[in-house]
Image (spheres, rainbow, N blue to C red):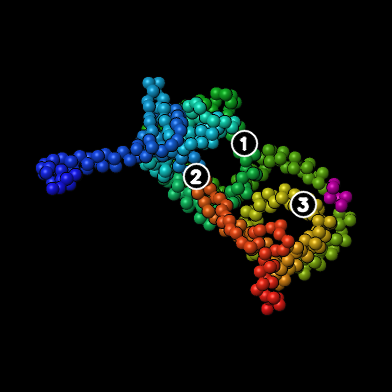
Amino acid sequence: MKGGLLGRLERASSFKLGVVLLTIALVVALSLFQKARISTTLHRGEAVQADFKRDYRMRPYVTKVKIAGVPVGIVTGVHHDPSGVTRVTMKVDDGTSTKLRLSPMAAIRPTTLLGGNYYVDLRPGGDPGTLHSVIPDSRTTIPVELDRVLETLNPAARVGVQRTVRDLNSTLTPKGQTSVRQVLKDAPGTLRPAGAVLEALRGTNPNTDLSKIVSNLDNIGRVLTAKQGQLAAVIDGLDRTSAILDDQKYAISSSIKLMPQALSNARTGLAALSVSLDHLKATSKSAEPVATRLDHLLARLQPALVEARPVVHDLRPALVDLRPLVQSLVPSARVGTKVLHDVDGAPLERVNGPIIHTLLSPWTGTGQYAGSGSTTTPFYKELGTMIAGMDNASKMTDRNGSTIHFQPGFGVGSVSDLPISLEQLFKMLLYPGGPK
């Protein structure tokens, strides 16, 4: 006669067995769906709360919580306050409240550039201590996605951005880079006259004239486009006018040279040049012998200069790019000079003397460590082997970062304060006449 659970199962009907199996399957399915909630509930930890200005796709028991990219917990609750603030409750690992200090910050960040999944990024801040309060919305931020930025641009603006990016690509070609460098080179000389032109554009009443012109631009545009094709005809006429001006550019240039303003500017320049000529006259006598020798030197250098001219021409862009680097090296050179002055003298003598001698000498033990080491291996190699061993010992990592591990052991040399070293005793027993 069979008894126990097997006997009861055999006596049970198929219907009852089906109900039992179905119930077990439902329990297992519910457990799998609630796996995150169950594991979070059973896991030890502490609660941290933060207020955000709105709920940004926070999902309880799905959204992760990280510190410096390392997961430390999960969101367990999202509560919407009537005032519009969303309070997010997070369960984090033990000790996280102390790591966050008294004034931490929180931010909702996307896992990718295009959004999708999000996580809560906690950043420590403030004085050391344990956090016991809610992180206010003044220290929390939510992400601004790329599509939200593009929504603020109308279709025409989006087309303009696309054309700008395409034109920027053309500008950054080698030919465009040369033009940009030339513009930057000529810009300082043109900014001052441009400032005068802009000042003149403000009119006699700077507070009102320019604003009136801008406000009437709509009327000007409507007048210019009142008749279809009229503006195009004006532009074509302007093209012909420009061609005529180009043909007569020499005559126009001669007329400009005769203008009174040009004479006034020339008078100012000549007055400044007179001062320079006075200084040049004082130095010209002493420079005559040098100029005579320089004439012969230039005559001999002329072939070399002709060959060097293409090289110098190609070096100009490189020198322009190198100039910021050289300027940034000036402080470093000054500090380096002081360091070299401090190192010169006794420090260098110590390095070239006992330090170098010790590093290059063979390492052998003394006292109770006599016989260890090697007479053919320098000390710096033994030191390098020790550092490499420490590097291998520090390769173990965990969620907190790198750690140093070691394996303790016991040998004949571990026992100290004996009348005779156990290592030496074994060597004497194994090699009575000494090692061969």
Determine whether 45 is above or below 332 in the image: above
| Residue 377 visible here | no
The Cα–Cα distance between marks 1 and 2, rounded to whole angstroms, is 28 Å
Amino acid type assigned to the residue bearing label 2 in the image:
Thr
Give the residue pinned by disc 3: 339
Residue 19 horizontal/vertical position (percent): 15, 40
Give the residue pinned by disc 1: 195
Residue drawn at point x = 81 percent, y = 64 percent: 295
Q: Secondary structure at mark 1?
A: helix
Query: Which of marks 3 and 2 precedes in the sequence?
Result: 2
The stretch in magenta equals 278-283
Determine whether 299 is above or below 393 in the image: below
Indicate which label's residue lies in the foreground, 1 or 2: 1
Query: Which of marks 2 and 1 precedes in the sequence?
Result: 1
Residue 31 horizontal/vertical position (percent): 29, 40
Residue drawn at point x = 57 percent, y = 52 percent: 404
Q: Secondary structure at mark 3?
A: helix
The Cα–Cα distance between marks 3 and 1, rounded to whole angstroms, is 47 Å
